[in-house]
Structures are given as structure tokens and as C-alpha cells.
Image: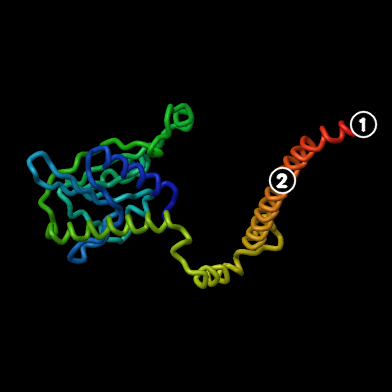
Amino acid sequence: MKTKLTRNLESTLYQYCYEQGAYVVEEVSMPDKKGIVDTLSYQQQPDGQIEWRCYELKVTKNDFHSKAKLSFIGNYNYFVLPQKLFEEVEDEIPSHIGVLIYRAFDKKAVDLAPQTLRAPGFLTVAKKAQYQDLQVDEKGLTSHFVASLFREVDKAKRVEKGLQLYSDDKLFKELKKRAKTGYDVYKPDHNLYDRFIDDTESDAVTALQEELDARNAEYQELKLRYDALTQPNLEGKV
């Protein structure tokens, strides 16, 4: 499970790469069992050459010292770290690996911004990465990159379509799975089923009230027309 800080680094890095004119995707498995890189960017240079950059995101010292394989196979490779962590591990970073420092935007500045910011913070280059030849076959890496892009597009389409992708049977089974966690007698406001029933009943009452109001308005209009037609006849008989 990603922490909020990790997600902030990830979204800020995405925006950073986007502004550099690169295509970027998270969590890309490497060819030849070279592990999984946190973020991989692909950028075509003016001379037509493709430049690959790998980014590993770390938020704690334990995370930095994790036994997970570092997939620094790109032409340029970076750690993305909060300032405090960089100060703690600076001496342990290999000379050819670059470092991007994450800093969160000040909350007051965010509130005063004329438009919604696309990232929760910004990145600065604390240490430049040195160029190296690509450490895997480029065709294989391109294939893995495209597969990861497809995964993200598919995920976005599923979110957009929402529950339309699931049959009634699947939805019912999912509700049954959540029966134990979805109902708390001590916290009725948090009960999934009670909330669903309340919302459904509320929608039904609202719909019936709207229909009743419409019929009442129609009745009043017909009554006014009837009165307008019959009033002269009544006056003639007086």
C-alpha cells in the first residue's frame, strides 16, 4: 500500500516528466528479470535518439535500504527523495545516479493559487545523473513500456465505466463479501447497507414527490381554464 507521501512524489514526478516533454508510466517490469522500476520515461531527442530515464522513489531510510532490486537500466537514472531523506543517505548514492528532491507546496500558497495546481509539490535536481548505455535490449524495453501504458489506459477506462462492467451477480457477490465489514451496529452512519437503503428510499420519495407536484400543477392549470370558461356563463345567470 502506497503512503500519501509516495503518491505525492509519484504525481509530482509524473507532472515533472510531462513538462519535460517525455512519455511516462509507473511500475514497469524490466526485460531479462531486471526488476520493476517505479517510473520510466521515454523521450525522443532532436537528433532522433531515444532517451530512457528510470526513477526510483524512496520516502524512508528503511525504504531506501530495501532489498528490492533497483532497476537503474536507463540512459539516466534517478532517486526521487524528500529533502530530509536525501541528507541522511547522500553518501550512499552511487556517483552515476542522479537525485531529484521533492518539496511540497505551502498550503497557503496552494489556497492562493489562481488555478488548481497539477501536482502537490515540485522537484529540484540535487545531483545530476551520468549517462550510461541502456542496460537491456531496447526493443524489449519498448514492448514492456507499451504494455504498461496499455494497463494504465485500461484502468482509466474501467474507472470511467464504473459498475457498468460488472454483472448483477458479481455485484451481489461483492456486497456479500463486504457484509462483515460493511455493517457496524455501533456506527450506523458507516453502515454500507443502511446508507444504500436510505439513499434508495430517499430517491424514491423524491421521485414520487416530483410526480405529485407535477400532477398538482397540471390540475391547477386545468381548474383555472375551467373557471375561465364557466365564469361568464355564471355571471349571465345572476
Q: Quadrant of the N terminus?
A: bottom left
Q: Residue 192, how many percent across, how many down? A: 62, 61
Q: Residue 214, how many percent across, how many down? A: 69, 46
On residue 213, the disc is 2
Q: Is residue 172 in view from this perspective?
A: yes
The residue labelled by disc 1 is 238
Kind of residue sitting beneath label 2: Asp
Relative vertical location of residue 228 with respect to residue 196 in this rendering, above or below: above
Which sits in the foreground, 51 or 132? 51
Q: Is residue 94 in view from this perspective?
A: no
Q: Residue 163, how many percent across, how many down? A: 48, 61
Q: Residue at x 9, y 46 (%)?
A: 49
Relative vertical location of residue 224 with respect to residue 38 in this rendering, above or below: above
Q: Quadrant of residue 118?
A: top left
Q: Residue at x 30, y 61 (%)?
A: 68
Q: Residue at x 19, y 60 (%)?
A: 143
Which sits in the foreground, 136 or 83? 136
Which sits in the foreground, 60 or 177? 177
Residue at the outermost front position = 236
Of pointers 2 and 1, the one earlier in the residue sequence:
2
Instruction: Left or right? Give the position of 219 relative to 157.
Output: right
